[in-house]
Amino acid sequence: MGYFRKNIEQAEGYTPGLQPHRAEVTKLNTNENPYPPSPAVLEVLSQITSEQLRRYPDPNADEFRQAAARINGVEPGCIMCGNGGDELLKIALQAFCDNKRPVSFAVPTYTLYAVLAKLNNCKAIEVAFDKEFNLPAKLSATPAALTIVCNPNAPTGSIVSREEMVCLADEIKGVLLVDEAYVDFAQDNCTELIKDFKNVLIIRSMSKGYGLAGIRFGYAIAQPSLIAGLMKVKDSYNVNTVSIAAAAAAIKDQKYFRRNIEKTKKERERLTEQLRQLGFTVPKSHANFVLAENSGYKAAEIYDKLLQRDILVRFFPVPGLENKLRITIGTSRQNDILLDNLKEILPH
């Protein structure tokens, strides 16, 4: 007899992107921001005292909640902080789902959703996107207690309009979780939905747009009644003193943030066009990555050849993605290194 619960024994777990330890690698595989965080972050970190580290952190991270509330035009009671967006996803599954209360989501999407469902011993209802990655009509008809829409979607970069999300929130009986980890690179978001819907929960990340992947910080936006329920599920001190200070400093510096977002968007358009000229099919992306496919060459082979040259991209050997590569938008130099090597790798 094993020590673990049956669902844990059977779960495969989430597989993160490769994290190399050598600085000379061109790393375009985990959707990190290629630019450093705001200088204000390093300044506030230099002021952290030993007394702050001796004490437990603020359990609710109120400094960040207040700053994020101002930026998003909501009350602080509408904000909840987490140890990355992934912890907030875990909390949501724990709060809303069990073996009689399923979760639903469209696929392909962020593979952690299915992993968390397995770990929480709840049924995952997967509804397939069409070839254009439009929101499936069947998603609203599932008996799910929690419906998740990654928007923009990972790893496709596609986006569902706010109007469609309004309809979905109105049609479903459970909670609609909008995972907006990549929304900083899109033109629109769903913040306004929480003003009209009690069942909408939005999750944001400080890893992508703000360049803070190393500190693990995310936040949720919802009506106070929903936030209050989720607060019961989180750990007592789920975000630490250092991460609270860094995240608060970063979100307050909107000028620096927007400047880096615009640089990434411009590079996204340039990389998309250059990849298309190399024979790749690249749909329009609303995130900080693109999904690329070259029908004349297997994605796994391109991935391996790039890896041999110390260039990391992401390859998902799963249905619907088996011949596609997800490529993070890097700096101009990083993108040029990728393109120059692809020109050597691909047949002429």
Image (cartoon, rainbow, N blue to C red):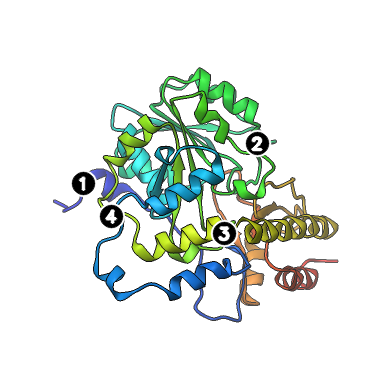
Q: Name the residue under label 3.
A: 210
Q: Count the numbered circles shown.
A: 4
User: Which residue in the structure is indicated by mark 2?
Assistant: 133
Determine whether the residue tagged by mark 2 lies in a helix, strand or loop.
Answer: loop
Residue at the left extreme of this rendering: 1
Residue 313: x percent and y percent?
62, 64
**Residue 14, image quadrant:** bottom left
Q: Which of marks 3 and 1 is nearer the N terminus?
A: 1
Please give the name of the residue rendered at 50% of the width and 48% of the height, measured from the top-left corner.
Answer: 68
Q: Residues within 10 Å of mark 3 (few under 14, many from 20)?
A: many
In depth, the one of 217 and 348 nearer the eye is 217
Q: Alpha carbon of mark 4 to alpha carbon of mark 3: how far?
A: 23 Å
Q: Residues within 10 Å of mark 1 (few under 14, many from 20)?
A: few
Q: Residue 5 carries which label?
A: 1
What distance separates the C-alpha of mark 3 from that of mark 1?
38 Å
Mark pair 2, 4: CA separation: 38 Å
